[in-house]
Structures are given as structure tokens and as C-alpha cells.
Amino acid sequence: MNACVRARKLLSRYIDKEARDMDTAFIEAHVAGCPSCKKELRELSCVRELLLRKERRALPEGELARRMLRQILYEKSGRQDFSMVGMGYLARRLIFLPAIAIVLSAAFLILIPQQTNRYSWEEHVLSGAPTTTAMALGLILGTRV
Amino acid sequence: MTDDAFYIERFLDGEEKAFEAIVRKYQNRVLNIVFSLIGKDRESEDIAQEAFLKVYRSLKSFRRRCSFSTWLYRIVINTAYDFLRKRKDVVTQDEALGQSADVSGGREDVLSALLIKEKEALIQKALGKVPLAYRAAVVLKDIEGLSYGEISKVLGCRIGTVESRIYRARQLLRKELMKSRGDVI
């Protein structure tokens, strides 16, 4: 195996200090005489350092336990947690859909009868006039056409 | 008996409070793994909570074939995977910059805080570009500090695979960081 290929295969373990002694000795001897592998080692070590120093998130002590306890209590009492904090990502975004559906239904019920409330369904059938989608929906909802 | 085993035994004996001790111990570790994988604060907290709930519901079936932390991290990684599969998005720099920036204080403090935030955002953005399997391996190594052996148990793959995933992840991170901002690296 080419020395560079072998060195690069072992590089992660070496950087993470998980290489065997003989592999450590090989890498150190190899990078001493190989500028390309030395550069690779330096840059990948730098990437590791950046991740090690990456800012860590921290919640207040016991925060997640408190949220969980609330969720568990809700589940045990047979209810669902409707608070925004306890809801999942999708639920938080879908919460407005029922509200939109209610508004649209109300608008439909108000507007459709006003536009089509001219004569009874029986009269319409007898007249032989074409039936529109709005008329068909009006029939389903029990309104006049 | 380890702390974890002690609390698990107490929980399985019916003492619910014991589970709280487990959550307290692992909450920030889990949160940081999730955040590094998905790069969004609020969703990370939801996913961490969801993972702990899964653990709570299935702790009775924990067979102790591996350590509790390995089992927990496996659930955390899978929960984050499920979220990302549904979302299929990558964290944006603006979103990452907009998160939890506390820039109160003097003008220099504000500037240095912004520089740190920008650097953090670039690192997070670069992580978001790394394929999930590689990202999980490097996050478990460099953010959580697990050994190659532990990572192989969490991810259910061979140590050699973990080794190559970490190497590849670091190469891709270097490429992304150099592309976005040369002075980060």
C-alpha cells in the first residue's frame, strides 16, 4: 500500500488519539517527510479543534424534565398538551389550518346562498337549466339554488 | 452499579422521580447532539424532549446489551434522523445567526459577540452540508466525545466505518469552511 494512502487511512484515529502505538509511529515518521500529508493532518486537526470549541447549548437546570413531566401528566390524564411549547414542529405550523378552514366555510355559507338563492331546487330541475358546481354544493349543504 | 443503572432500577420499581434525574443528567448532552445535527434551537429542544419521551415509554424494554447512554444516543440520533427526513432542509446562515444572540454590553462586546456568532453560524452551516451519516459520526466524536467503539455501537456499524465517516466528514467540513470563509480555518 502506498505510504500516503496508509497514512491518510489512519489520520482520523491519530488525530483522535485512538491510533495504536505502531500506527502513531508510522504517521509521525511519514508526515515528517511528506508535506502533503502534513498539510492534511494540520487542516483536519484544525477542523476538529473548531468542533471541540463549538458553542454548547444549555437549558436551565431541569427544564426538559419539567416539560416532560407536564407532557406525561397530560397523556396520563387522557388529554393532549395544547401549549405551544409542548407541541411538535409540525403541529405548531398546522394549528392555523382549522382556523382557516372555519373562516372559509363561514364565508362559503354566507356568500353562496346570497348568490344563488333565487328559486327552489325542484323549480331548478323542472326548468332544465344547467347545474353549476356551486349549485351542487348548495344542494349538499341544504340551501336553495 | 453506575448512576444510570441505579436510577433505571428505581424507575422500574415505580419511582417516577428517578427518571427526572436521568433527564437532568443528559439534557444538555442530548440537546447539543441534536442541535449539531439539525442546527435549529427550538426544534432541537422539541426533538430532545421527544427522544426522552421515547426512552421513558420504552425503558422497560431496555435489555442492557449496551450501556444506557449508548441506547439513549441511538434513540436521539434516530429521532433527529426522522425529523430531518421529514423536513429535508439545511440550516441557513441567517437562521443560525439569528439564534440566541445576546449582545448586551459595550460596543466591543457586541462586535466580538457578533464575530463569535458568525463563526458559530458558519460552522453550523458547514455541518448542515455534510451527509447525515458522516455528520452523526463526527458530532458524536467531537461534540459528545465518544470513543470510536461507542460510536460504532450507537450507529450500528463497524469501527472501520466510523473511522472513515469521521475522516470524510472532516474533509467535507474543511471544504465547506474554506469555501464560505477562509478565515474560519
Image: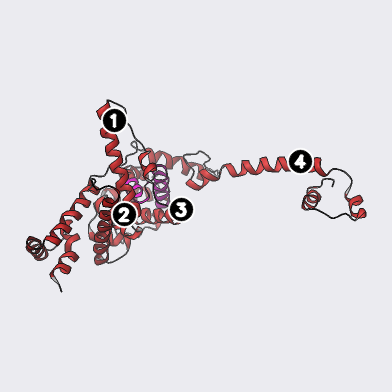
Whether B37 is among the magenta residues is yes
Label 1 residue SS: helix
How packed mark 4 is, by other alpha carbons closer than 10 Å (few <14, some 14-19, many 20 or more), is: few
Name the residue that disc number 1 marks. Answer: B110
* In-image side of B111 versus A40 (left or right): right
Tell me the residue at 36%/44% (across/down): B93
Which residue position is annotated with label 4?
A: A111
Q: Quadrant of residue B183?
A: top left
Q: Are marks 4 and 2 in contact (CB under 8 Å)?
A: no
Q: Are marks 2 and 3 in contact (CB under 8 Å)?
A: no
Tag 2 secondary structure:
helix
Q: Is residue B169 left or right of residue A94?
A: left
Task: Answer yes or no: is residue B44 visible.
Answer: yes
Q: Which mark is residue A17?
A: none
Give the CA separation, mark 1 to mark 3: 33 Å
Three-letter amino acid code at the position of disc 1: Val
The amino acid type, in three-letter code, at marker 2 is Phe
Task: Give the image quarter of residue A14.
Answer: bottom left
- Where residue A43 sits, quadrant-wise, is bottom left
Instruction: Give the camera-side residue of B160 and B134.
Output: B134
Q: Secondary structure at mark 3?
A: helix
Rendered view: B96 above or below A130: above
Quick one: which residue is furthest to the bottom in this view? Answer: A1
Q: Is residue A132 left or right of residue B54?
A: right
Of the two numbered discs 2 and 3 on the same chain, state the one appearing first in sequence: 2
The residue positioned 32% from the left and 44% from the top of the image is: B121
On screen, residue A129 above or below A144: below
Three-letter residue code for mark 3:
Arg
Name the residue that disc number 3 marks.
B87
Task: Determine which of the numbered discs, if any, sits on residue B68 in the image.
Answer: 2
